[in-house]
Amino acid sequence: MNDRLAWERDGRDWPNREASRFVEAGGIHWHVQTMGQGPTLLLLHGTGAATHSWRDLAPRLAARFTVVAPDLPGHGFTRIADDTSLSLPGMASAIRDLLAALAIRPDLVAGHSAGAAVLIRMTLDGMIAPRGIVSVNGALMPFRGVAGHTFAPIARVLASNTLTARAFAWWAEGRGPIRGILASTGSTITPEGEELYARLARNPGHVHAALAMMANWDLEPLTAALPRLAVPLLLIAGGRDGTVPPDESFQARDRVPGSRVVCLRTLGHLAHEEKPAEIAALVEEFWGEVGPDGR
């Protein structure tokens, strides 16, 4: 069992491999995929995922945009030296350094789950100035009640023990456990998608990064700052999302002036993997509204 994914081995059939490259920025060895032409669209995946999450959506968007999609720090094929970037402020700063190294200023940004929180944090802090933000089942609200007091401490304990990640990776050797986790999201994805998530879950380095990210995640300051967001925000919510309740998108809408929600009632947390054409159409429609030629 290898602690890090190896591109030559684990990336041999990675989706959109021809669009991949590796970049050094901010002390991090980044895996980034770039494709298409046009206005620059930055895509950020969520906790525990990687660029494979955009495998069908990114090529569709590349017909209209220059799509840039990195693996987040410690996730997939992006390597980190320590855990300092595995918090919301740390992740935002790391992505800022990557964009500077790539000399990119995104015109539009879209994030899934925790990726949406990173993009909103960056916008609020002036790290990026997109014309619009798309949140796909964005994780923008802190856990409430008992969960809020227990989730992060438990994650911190798990992340602090290197054996935990190795034990999870060993447990994930079969396809069954990953199928159970994916089913809990409310989404049904292809066998190819299942295998790619299983490949990530079998890697202790990737698992540790996901656990450490959850352990260090604090959404209270972001939620409090949402009313200050002055950039158009489109919130896409899956009605069957078992990970981030769709009501959280409506809560975010009520906090951000001028934002709106599109609820896709039959889709789950991985809506962009279930119906990439439908999500692409919503992103393109939104760009038509907020882009330079918009209303």
Image (cartoon, rainbow, N blue to C red):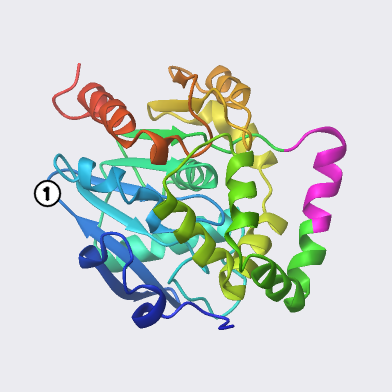
The reply to whether the magenta stretch includes residue 179 is: no
Q: Quadrant of residue 206?
A: bottom right
**Which quadrant of the figure has residue 139?**
top right
Where residue 88 appears, x then y in whole percent?
Answer: 59, 53
Front-most of residues 257 and 235: 235
Q: Which residue is mark 1?
A: 37
Percent coordinates x, y for residue 150 in the rendering: 85, 48
Badge 1 marks a residue whose secondary structure is loop
Q: Kindly identify the residue that appears in the image at 69 percent across and 67 percent down.
A: 171
* Residue 262 screen position, x and y as percent: 43, 19
> Who's the residue at 65% across and 56% down the image?
177
Provide the residue span drawn in magenta.
143-154
Vertical relation: 155 (above or below) 63 = below
- Main SS of the magenta part reads helix
User: Quick one: label 1, few (<14), some, or many (20+) residues within 10 Å?
Assistant: some
Q: How many marks?
A: 1
Q: Position of residue 241 (x, y in %)?
A: 58, 31
- Up-down: is 145 above or below 83? above
Q: Nearer the viewer, residue 157 or 122?
A: 157
Q: Quadrant of the C terminus?
A: top left
Instruction: Give yes or no for residue 152 being in the magenta stretch.
Output: yes
